[in-house]
Amino acid sequence: MSDAAAWDARYRALPGMFGTRPNEYLRSQAWRLAPGARALALGDGEGRNGVWLAEQGLIVTSLDWSRVGLAHARALAEARGVALTFIEADATRWDYPDSAFELVAWIFLHLPPADRRLVAAGACRALAPGGLLVLEGFTPAPAGRRAGGPQDPALLWSRTAVEECFPALEVLELLEGTVLLDEGPKHQGRAEVVRALLRRPA
Ligand SMILES: C[S@@+](CC[C@H](N)C(=O)[O-])C[C@H]1O[C@@H](n2cnc3c(N)ncnc32)[C@H](O)[C@@H]1O
């Protein structure tokens, strides 16, 4: 299942499946984030990352195609006392505005390769010169270890996929390896991930 209705069903069945705290890699970049900067949280689900960015003083657009996820994100924002712009859209079809964001957060958004390239092109267009893209995604697990994230290997990330998707961006960090996730009931324990910090040249 990989469409919006499937995600609606998942969020209905297990609200808070990725927790309400931000992704650890995104949080580690807090020192780079300037209050007042504009951020786009892509595939923001129940809003833990978008809401945290708004709490850091950023002006946040949170985009997801799951209506249920967005409803949970709105409730989280209200509970935390922050305002975000929520957009219900398919990230592959959204009309990405030019140079509109100083930050794009792409956290655990896994797409088929053709869609991934499409969304990556949109994200690059939407980044302002000097803007940052922070990405974390699951990579294939070594033999014998249970993979985290999507079961379809085509949806997984790798360092090479990052390099291929974002050729126009400078690589500030591109890490692949094992991390210990503690992000809600669905993201617990050892996981193989890629973490990338990329910048549109100024
Ligand atoms: C694994 S969840 C991660 C959610 C959030 N980024 C987080 O870290 O908590 C993946 C999210 O991507 C969204 N998604 C997947 N494909 C999408 C698409 N084509 N357009 C918009 N959202 C999409 C799903 O609805 C889901 O909320």
Image (cartoon, rainbow, N blue to C red):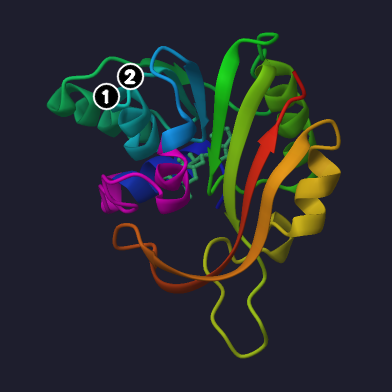
| Vertical relation: 104 (above or below) 113 | above
- Camera-nearest label, 1 or 2: 2
Residue 77 seen from this side: yes
Reading the image, the residue beneath label 2 is: 57
Which residue lies at the image location 85% right of the left edge and 45% below the top edge?
A: 164
Q: Is residue 104 left or right of residue 26?
A: right
Which one is nearer the viewer's eye here, 93 or 178?
178
Q: Amino acid at mark 1?
A: Arg
Q: Quadrant of the C terminus?
A: top right
Dot 2: what SS? loop
Dot 1: what SS? helix
Which one is nearer the viewer's eye here, 12 or 131?
131
Which one is nearer the viewer's eye here, 67 or 83?
83
Point out the stretch of residues depicted in magenta: 12-30
Which residue lies at the image location 76% right of the left edge and 48% below the top edge?
A: 162
Q: Amino acid at mark 2?
A: Gly
Residue 24 highlighted magenta (yes or no):
yes
Callout 2: 10 Å neighbours few (<14), some, many (20+)? Answer: some
- Cα separation, mark 1 vs mark 2, equals 17 Å
Q: Quadrant of residue 117?
A: top right
Q: Residue 33: where, in percent of width, then height?
A: 45, 28
Q: What number is the disc on residue 74? A: 1
Q: Residue furthest bottom?
A: 144
Q: Disc 1, ligand 1: is the CB inside 8 Å?
A: no
